[in-house]
Amino acid sequence: MTHNCNNYNIKECFKSLKEVVFIRELEQRILSEGQVLPGEVLKVGSFLNQQIDTKLLMDMGEEIARLFKSNNVTKVLTIESSGIAIAYAAGLAMGIPIVFAKKHSTSNLSGDLLTSKVFSYTHQQTYDVAVSADYITKDDTVLIVDDFLAKGNALAGLIEIVGKAGAKLAGCAIAIEKGFQGGGDALRAKGIRVESLAIIDKMTDDSLEFRVQQQQQQQLQ
C-alpha cells in the first residue's frame, strides 16, 4: 500500500503516517497479547490494565490530545480504576487536570457530590459513582476518557455527571471499543462524539476483526 503526500506538507504527512503506525501498533498488541475470556471479555492486562506499557500509554495520550486539540478541554474525567492511567496520559498531553469518579464511598469524599449509577459489564455489578462538585463546574469543558467501551454504561454514567455539573461535554475518548456490543454507535447516534483508538467489530475465541475507521482510510489513500 502506498501513501500519497501530495496534498500535505512534509510535517503534516509525517504526522499522518505516525498516527496510522500507532493505531496499527495498538491493534497488533491486542492481537498478539489479548485474551478472549468467557462472556465476550477481552483481557489486555499485559500492556494496558494491570501491567502497563508506558510508551504505548503515552502515545495513546498524545493521540487523544491531537483528536481533541480544538475543543478547549479543561478537565479529563474517568472512572476508577483502570481508566485512570490512560486519562492521566491524555491529561498530561493536554496539560490539564484529570478527575476520576469513585466507585466506593470514602471518608475523604464529602460535601456536595455529583453522582450516578453505573453497571459494570465486566463485574456484573452496579456501582454508585461520585465526584466532588468542586472538581467539575459549569465553567469546564470535559473530555471523558476510559480504557474500554462495550455497552456504554460507564460512559452514560459519566455523561450524566457532566450534565449535573452544568459543564460542556467535548466527547469521549476510548482506548479499545468493542463495536459489536453497540455502546459506542448508540452514543454517536445521539450526537455525542466518541473517538476510539481501536474498534473491534467481531471477536471470537481465536480471532479479532478491527473496524477500519474513516480517518485511517483518508490517511492511507
Image (cartoon, rainbow, N blue to C red):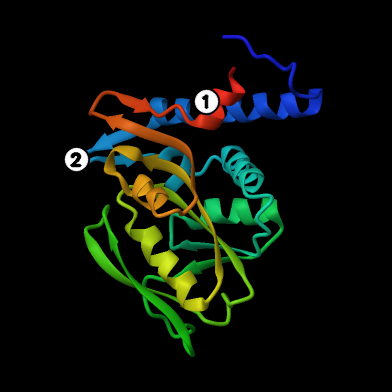
Would you call the spot at circle 2 few (<14 residues within 10 Å), some (14-19), or many (20 or more)? few
Residue type at tag 2: Pro
Residue 92 coordinates in the image, percent (x, y): 67, 54
Tag 1: amino acid? Arg
The answer to whether residue 213 is above or below residue 139 is: above
Name the disc covering residue 149, or none: none
Q: Residues within 10 Å of mark 1 (few under 14, many from 20)?
A: some
Secondary structure under tag 2 reads loop
Left or right? Give the position of 10 relative to 192. right
Q: Which residue is under mark 2?
A: 38
Q: Position of residue 193 (x, y in %)?
A: 49, 50
Of the residues tagged 2 and 1, which is closer to the observer? 1
Q: Residue 22: in sight, yes or no?
A: yes
- Residue 44: quadrant of the picture: top left
Residue at 52% of width from left, 55% of height from top? 171
- Position of the C terminus by quadrant: top right
Give the spatial CA distance, label 2 vs label 1. 26 Å
Say whether disc 2 or disc 1 marks the residue closer to the N-terminus: 1
